Amino acid sequence: MENIFHQNWLVFFNRSNTFKQFPAELIVNIIGKVSQPIFAEIQDENDKLKNAYKKILQTAIFFVTPILLYIAFFAKPFFVFLLTDKWIECVDFFRILCFTGIIYPVHVFNLHIINIKGRSDLNLKLEIIKGVLIVFTLITSLQFGVYGLLYGSLVISFLSIFINSYYSKIYINYPISEQIFDLRLFFITPIITTAFAFLIDQYFFVRFTDFYRLLISFIISSLLYISVSFFTKPYVLTELLLLKKRHYDKCN
């Protein structure tokens, strides 16, 4: 076991997971609070609920994906700048975990559908199924060391999406295959724009200090993403503003 696990790997894993999870949870919580009253109003109108859910999910992915991809691409200067180079071993861990963070909104909002329909009791059933899956995957991947566990957690995360989305298909006729199709541009666009910003950094700014690399690459990545999004999915920001306005009007 000593040969498989480095004594600091658990610390690196926890720190990487914290950085990965913070932006995803923050964005999902904000959007969830705004959308919850709206979902409650249309909980018995499945077509409207499906349409609202689709927009909420797209909005969450619209913000979560570019943030996590940016930090993943620039993980090395990011960790060195914030935590010094003693945390450099977090980089590979973090990049793998970022993929689980990107699909975090899909997990959460699929489970919201169950609660909106008043069937929170089904969460226990899903948790038992996922628990068995987690134990099996961890036992299987343990022999491959810490990277086996990391990739195992990635496999668990993707398989859990199919489990969490089971009742979305039943209650609002929105299976995971359709969800993935509707989200395709929200994944592809930030991958392309962030990768392009990374290539620019490698060619022109790699010798700069970590702070300036992060600053310049963030500006380039953001401008590219906003510009492309303006032509491919400009309705997302509009929908978010409308949701916020409805929430504000309801509270007042």
Image: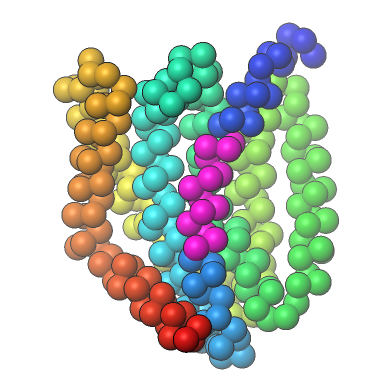
Query: Which color scheme did the rendering employ for the protein?
Result: rainbow
Position of the N terminus, as image quadrant, is: top right
Find residue 91 and report its horizontal and vertical position in percent. 49, 24
Assess whether residue 164 is covered by the magenta stretch. no
Residue that protrudes farthest toward the top in the picture = 3
Q: Is residue 242 left or right of residue 234?
A: right
Residue 224 in the image: above or below residue 74: below
- Which residue sits at x=63%, y=42%? 155
Q: Residue at x 77, y 61 (%)?
A: 126
Within the image, what quadrant is residue 100 found in? top right
Indicate the quadrant where residue 121 lies.
bottom right
Q: Nearer the viewer, residue 138 or 250?
A: 250
In the rendered image, residue 192, in percent from the top left (x then y), is placed at 29, 43
Residue 47 screen position, x and y as percent: 51, 86
Residue 181 shows up from this direction: no
Residue at 83% x, 56% y is 128
Quadrant of residue 46 within the rendered picture = bottom right
197 shown above or below 106: above
Q: Predominant secondary structure in magenta? A: helix
Q: Is residue 217 above or below residue 132?
A: above
Task: Determine whether, in the image, residue 159 is placed left or right of residue 90.
Answer: right
Report whether 150 appears left or right of 179.
right
* Nearer to me, 7 or 170: 7
Residue 105's spot in the image, x, y percent? 53, 58
Q: Residue at x 51, y 14 (%)?
A: 86
Q: Which residues are magenta?
A: 17-30
Q: Judge whether 90 appears above or below 175 on screen.
A: above
Q: Is residue 28 magenta?
A: yes
Depth check: give the residue in front, 220 or 171: 220
Residue furthest front as drawn: 252
Whether residue 107 is visible? yes
